[in-house]
Amino acid sequence: MATWNVINLSELENFKDFSSEYYRADNIQKSNVIRKIGTIRAGNAGFITDGEHGSPCWSETSGIKYITAEFIKENYIEQGDFKQITKEQDKKNARARLQVGDVLVYSVGAYAGLAAVAEPHLFPANIPRSVAIIRLNKNENLNAEYVSAFINSKYGKFQTFRLRAGNSQPVLALDKIRQIEIPVIEEQFQKEIQSYYQDSYKQRLLSQSLYHQAEALLTKELQLDKLQLPKNKWYTAQYSEVVDDGRMDSEYFSPVVKKILEADFLKGSFTIGGLFYIVRGYTPKSYYTMGVPMVKTKSVRTPVIDKKRIEDYANSNESLTLTQENDLILAAMGVGSLGRTSFITQDDSGVAIDGTLRIFRKKDENFKYVEIPTMLFLSTEIGQKLIYRGIVGSTGIISVTDDYLAKIPVPMVDEPIRKKLTELVLKSIDTKKQSQALLARAKTRVEELIEQEANKK
């Protein structure tokens, strides 16, 4: 049944946007709720700018991280392999140099509107034009954590969504961000939100520390840091090797990989195919709004999948592609995703979709705690080199086959070490979930406080 909403000329508030979407009834209702409390526009609450508009100048030694939009999640900044820019470019773009209390907004791309507070452990850092900063004035009685949680709440999201322009590449322009209305609630309530945010931050740092401990333990046990990789400018391969492996590309016969395969830590190793079954992801004929969540290549993160990125659903009778607890999922396709591996927890099951590989252990009671050590090894620089050796396809669409992956060797450390690695990573995962729960509570609490204050008016 069709629905409509009638707006009087006197009620028009945005003379740059006359779309029906802007004046949807539920948008008007949310506007009325926050305006009962009293609001301040973001442009009046602080200085708003974006980052570098030109091409970045990269550095390997400056230490100045370049925080792109893809790292901005709902109320936090995802830890990743940040590129670095030169000190000269950072100085040139000083207005976008991150400061304590900056609220970062994902402004160009599919998730335009997500916000997070700049986190101290990332400093020094700068941003590109796909990220905007709201740098609050100190005299406006707003704290950054509350503003971030508000923008990500339903009372902020409806504003960022209707202020965006574009479809395939949404843009939340700076002048639109300045129009966001922020309700001013009592300081004690803002501090409550700040407390949730800060406790979550501590838990997330602890989660990262636990995971790094697991990485360090594996590196020490296998002495991965002792391996000296060659830097040959040229090398040769036997014709028989070309025939046997069915490959003619030079990268496949790199002496770097040959050195890895001859390393002591791989003596007595097992292949992935020897320990696990490997099933290529299901290709759905169509997508549905109901069914089982799909685990796609963009969902794969280490150590666990990014549930925020499981957006579509599929009905599938392909039981072998339905992930289960303790499975591994490997992104086997796509620039930037290929080689990532996730461990599936009880809460993360879904249908593995084309471009991913479901990896699950064969019934061998002689080997326990092998999934997480395998994921850790594949995520190391050495593990990634072994995966990328098998790349096929062009630079636009690259992939590795399940047959190739099955041949990759996995070092088998002693069971007590495997158990310790598993305990550390599982504790890291659990701690991160606690962190996420605190952020979810902060967002929900913002919505409760707004509605409570509005009902008093």
Image (cartoon, rainbow, N blue to C red):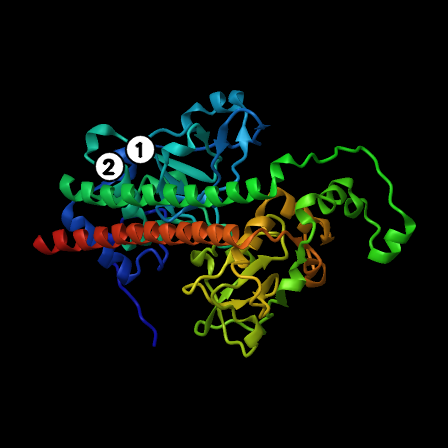
Q: Nearer the viewer, residue 299 or 382?
A: 382
Q: Circle 2 sits in a helix, a strand or a loop, which is it?
A: loop
In the picture shown, does residue 231 fall above or below 92? below
Q: Position of residue 457 (x, y in %)?
A: 8, 52
Say which amino acid is labelled 2: Asn
Q: What's the mark number on residue 143?
A: 2
Q: Nearer the viewer, residue 368 or 152?
A: 368
Q: Position of residue 323 (x, y in %)?
A: 51, 68
Label tally? 2
Q: Nearer the viewer, residue 56 or 260?
A: 260
Q: Circle 1 sits in a helix, a strand or a loop, which is it?
A: loop
Q: What's the mark number on residue 222?
A: none
Q: Which residue does the image show at 22% across and 59% down from the upper left?
A: 29
Q: What's the mark number on residue 101?
A: 1
Does residue 398 appear to the left or right of 183 in the view shown? Answer: right
Q: Nearer the viewer, residue 8 or 391?
A: 391
Does residue 315 appear to the left or right of 242 in the view shown? Answer: left
